[in-house]
Amino acid sequence: MGRETRAMQDDDATNPAMFWVLEGETLFRKKEGSGKACSDCHSTLQGAAARHPARDAKSGRLLNLEQRINACRTERMDAPAYGYESRELLSLTAYVAKQSRGLEIQSHENPAVEAGRRLYQLRQGQLNLSCAQCHDERWGKKLAGTPIPQGHSTGYPLYRLEWQGLGSLQRRLRNCLTGMRAETFPFGAPELVELEAYLMWRARGMKMESPAVRP
Amino acid sequence: MSQAIVSMPKQAKRGEVLEIKTLAQHPMETGYRRTQEGVVIARNIIRTFVCTYNGAEVFRMELHPAIAANPLIAFTTVATESGTLEFRWAGDNGYAVTESAGITVV
C-alpha cells in the first residue's frame, strides 16, 4: 500500500468507507423484527472484529463477523438475515469493525485454524498454486505490475479502489481463487471461514485498521 | 443516510489558508461499460461541483467519466470573513446534493 492510500485510509474525512460506516450506524440503531435494535443490547462492540471468526458457543459453528451479525439478527431479533455482500451487511460490519480499530488481533491455535492452514497450503486450480506460494514465498515481488502483499486481513471490510466500493474478506478470497483458476467457494462457505480464521491467526498481534483502503 | 461528507476547520485566522476536503457518494458510472448481455450501462456521473463562500464562488470543478466512484475533492481557499461555505454537486439523472459548513474567522 502506498503512502497516499494510507493517508486516505487514516483520515476519516477522505476514507470513502465512511459512507458505509455512517449507514451501519443507522442500521445499528434501527428497531427490527422483535422491536429491538442492535444498540439495545450492545452499547459497544469494541474488540468484536479482532476476535472473529470465532466458534459460536451454542451451535458450535465457526462464525465470521458477518455471520455473527446475521445469527444475532435471526436468533435474537426475529429479523431476516442480510444477504452476503449486501450493502446492509457490509455497512453493519464496517460500523462494528471500526470500533476495533487499533486493537490487536486475538487468535490462538484451534482446529479451525489448522483446517484453514491446510487450505492455505493446498495447491489448487489450473495454475496449481497455493495461497502460500504467493503470500508466504513471494510477497514483495510483482504480480501484473503490483506488489504481492503478505496477505494480512487486518482491514476488512475494506474499500478497494479497484472495486470502487466496499468488500468483505470473502470477496477478496474468491477473487484470488478465480485468479488461480480454481473453483471458488460460495459466500459463507465453511472453507472460506476457516481460511479467514487462519489468516487472522497469521495476523495475530497486528493492529486492526478496518475499514481500510487498498488499491 | 448522508450523501456527502465535508471536513474543514471550524475556526481560522483572517488570511489563513483553509484546506477543505469533500467526499460525495456517487457510483460515477462511465457510460462505456456493458452488462454481460452486451447492453451499454447508461452514463451516470456528477457533472459539476461548486463551492461558494458567503455567496461568492471560490471553487468550481467539472467532472468527467474517468473520475472514480465516490470522488474525493480537496481544495483550499483563504479565510476572509465569518460565514457559511456551501457545496453543491450536480449531475446526471437530476442528481443534486448540497452541504454547508460554517466558519468563524477571528
Image (tube, rainbow, N blue to C red):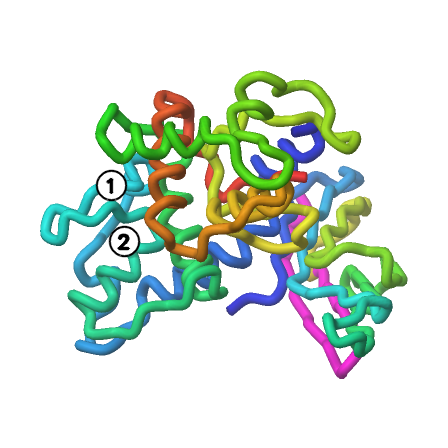
Using the numbered discs, state the Cα–Cα distance from disc 1 to disc 2 in whole angstroms: 9 Å
Disc 1 + disc 2, Cβ < 8 Å: yes
Q: Residue at x 11, y 46 (%)?
A: A57
Quick check: A207 above or below B104?
Answer: above
Viewer-side residue, B26 vs B14: B26
Q: Secondary structure at mark 1?
A: strand
Indicate left or right for B93 with A175 as reference. Answer: right
Q: Residue at x 70, y 26 (%)?
A: A147
The label on residue A54 is 1
The reply to the same-chain question for discs 1 and 2 is yes
Quick check: B67 above or below A126?
Answer: below
Kind of residue sitting beneath label 1? Ala
Q: Residues within 10 Å of mark 1 (few under 14, many from 20)?
A: many
Q: Secondary structure at mark 2?
A: helix
**Residue at the spot of label 2:** A68
The segment highlighted magenta reads: B85-106
Kind of residue sitting beneath label 2? Arg
Viewer-side residue, A210 vs B11: A210
Which numbered disc, 1 or 2, marks the residue that appears first in the sequence?
A: 1
Quick check: B9 above or below B25?
Answer: above
**Which image quadrant is residue B71 in?**
bottom right
Indicate left or right for A53 with A213 as reference. Answer: left
